[in-house]
Amino acid sequence: MTKTIILCDCLGSQTVDAQSVAEATGLTCSKMFTHACGAQIEETAALMAKGETMVACQQEAPLFRELAEEIEVAEPAFVDLRDRAGWSDEGSQAAPKMAALAAEALLPTPNERTVDVVSNGACLIIGSGDVAQQAARDLSKMLAVTLLTPTPVDTSPGLPFDSVSGTLARATGTLGRFSLRIDHFQQIIAGGRGAADWTPASDGALSECDVILDLSGEAPLFPAPEKRDGYLRADPGSQTAVAQAVLDASTMIGTFEKPLYIRLEESLCAHSRAEQAACSKCLNICPTGAITSAGEHVAIDPMICAGCGACAALCPSEAITYDAPPVSSVFARLNTLASTYRKAGGTDPRVLVHDAEFGSELISLAARYGRGLPADVIPLSVSALSGFGHAEMLAALACGFSTVSIVLGPQSERPVLEDEATLARAIAGRDAIALIDVNDPDALSDALYTAEPGAAVETPILPLGSRRQVTRLAAQTLQPEAETIPLPAAAPYGAILVDQDACTLCLSCVSLCPAGALGDNPDKPQLRFQESACLQCGLCSNICPEDAITLTPQLNLTDAAFTQAVVNEEEPFPCVECGALFGSKSTVERIMEKLAGKHSMFANPQTARMIQMCDNCRIQAQYHSQNNPFASKERPRVRTTDDYLSKRKDH
């Protein structure tokens, strides 16, 4: 059944072209409401009762959900056409953008993977003085509270919360599963008259809790503390901040759903091989410390992961992929927005990427009180702004957007986005990607209205496949004449340069290459390289005993990148006994030069000659040599029955 979109001009404050929306999306448009959430609410309810609907208003979504529940119909879908398109200095020209936004809202939303997190309400408050004690009193009505002070305080037993003293030496974990170690630990001794007595101090006390409220005013216990679930921190000198932290802590009891943001395919990880370091990009960038080394691959603690997406944007092998939603969903949304905008008559659209909180609020304020967004700027809300990497930026340009602007939020991983934007500009061959770092709605509007216009590609692509595949396809679309594009350092695409004079064809790089980009030839001494598979992880250059390999970041757009090219080869060495080919000539000659006549095992010409033999002939020569290491005494005569009988006769 075709959905009906409920359109409203919001008391005449915006212009909505219903025909353009219907033609570009296939939706059935309602009559143009003026006050669908108020004076015309009964008409809205009657329309919702007839079938599936989409409400073109995000502001009153809670009201429409309650209405759907009241009249017992399916909850409608929602799309915000007003703040993102209608309320604008160019709102009368926003019909193509409205059609694009409505079409995007029709796309199915992938199911989110989650895991249940249980908090039983055990709360540790760290702090001292009246502020910490009052917070403990307030929270003790809802949670099981323990107050940890740095030194014993002059108090009495019988408080509504537990009071202990000590220094928090270690804290690990997250909501529902914090593990603690406390040194100089002391407890109140119950009983007695007057001030409480305390037990003697001891180190290494271990405990657990579900929630930590840090009112110490000292350095946070965890990296990126604002992203650690269950860890609340407030300045004890700010009554407002403490009150908010206490309120937030009071709600952290029960069962919560924790999204599983990341998928990890360990077999694809290029972290290390044979204890030799390679790629550590995700380890270096993870703000919460959720990623750790686990041998040849990394490990990710999903309970600590805050879902920033930076690791997925940087992972060269796609061992780490963002899954809330997957990258295929982002590609589909970009393609739908651009293609629908063109279908509705628009040209050269721009995309504005923002997060769901800070960026959305900035756009809403700019629309309500300022100039709003230009008619050709289509906003795209993403759950992980830092995960919008070079592949997504290039996909946006290649599927029909003229420029890509990204609104940085307070918690965005700026270095990641800056590096990814630099890489995307190099691959695109144009300065079509901008990072907007503002916190004022008017400044956002000004930046977009004054930006230099760009031109979209003439033949857009359909962005399908992995991030590496889409990047390559986008590069060929954006730079059709280019064969090889030089890239900045640390790019995940490139070639290797082999110093043929230094390389001994030991092939240690081949056996350890995590991507299979390096290979050998079983029939002759050759080192082969397939550029399309290279991750530029650096393992080959780290492992090479001769320092013969250097990395060259670049993107080869020719078909040659998919074939194995010979980067070094030598004449094979024939065995001096049987003539069988083995090893390389330079390697055998180098070993002869270093060992023949200079090492005790190869002191004479006969033993030195074994270096020039294949494995078979070398073993034969050793076995028949005068000083045969396999030689033994003469075998004893086989004993017979007569031998045993003769012994009996002798006795």
Image (cartoon, rainbow, N blue to C red):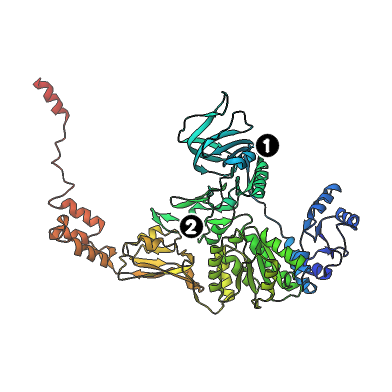
Q: Position of residue 634 (x, y in %)?
A: 13, 41
Tell me the kind of residue under disc 2: Asn
Instruction: Specify the label residue 284 is tagged with.
Output: 2
For label 1, the SS is loop
Tell me the kind of residue under disc 1: Met
> Could you tell me which residue is drawn at 45 percent across and 67 percent down?
530
For label 2, the SS is helix
Count residues near mark 2 (Cα–Cα under 10 Å), then give few for <14, some for 14-19, many for 20+.
Answer: few
Q: Considering only order in the chain, which callout, 1 or 2, is on the residue closer to the N terminus? A: 1
Say left or right for 287 vs 251: left
Q: Which residue is at the far left?
A: 650
Say left or right for 26 vs 316: right
Q: Camera-side residue: 99 or 268?
A: 99
Query: For the residues carrying marks 2 and 1, which lies nearer the camera in this image?
Result: 1
Q: Position of residue 502 (x, y in %)?
A: 30, 68
Instruction: Specify the label residue 142 is tagged with.
Output: 1
Quadrant of the rendered image containing residue 551: bottom left
Q: Camera-side residue: 68 or 57?
A: 57
Q: Quadrant of the C terminus?
A: top left
> Could you tell me which residue is drawn at 10 percent across and 21 percent down?
649
Q: Which residue is at the far bottom?
A: 481
Q: Camera-side residue: 24 or 57?
A: 57
Say left or right for 243 vs 501: right
Counting labels gives: 2
Q: Quadrant of the N terminus?
A: bottom right
Residue 645 visible from this viewpoint: yes
Q: Position of residue 47 (x, y in %)?
A: 88, 57
Between the C-alphas of marks 2 and 1, the distance is 39 Å
Quadrant of the rendered image containing residue 402: bottom right
Q: Position of residue 322 (x, y in %)?
A: 59, 56
Q: Is residue 390 positioned above or below 648 on the image?
A: below
Residue 176 visible from this viewpoint: no
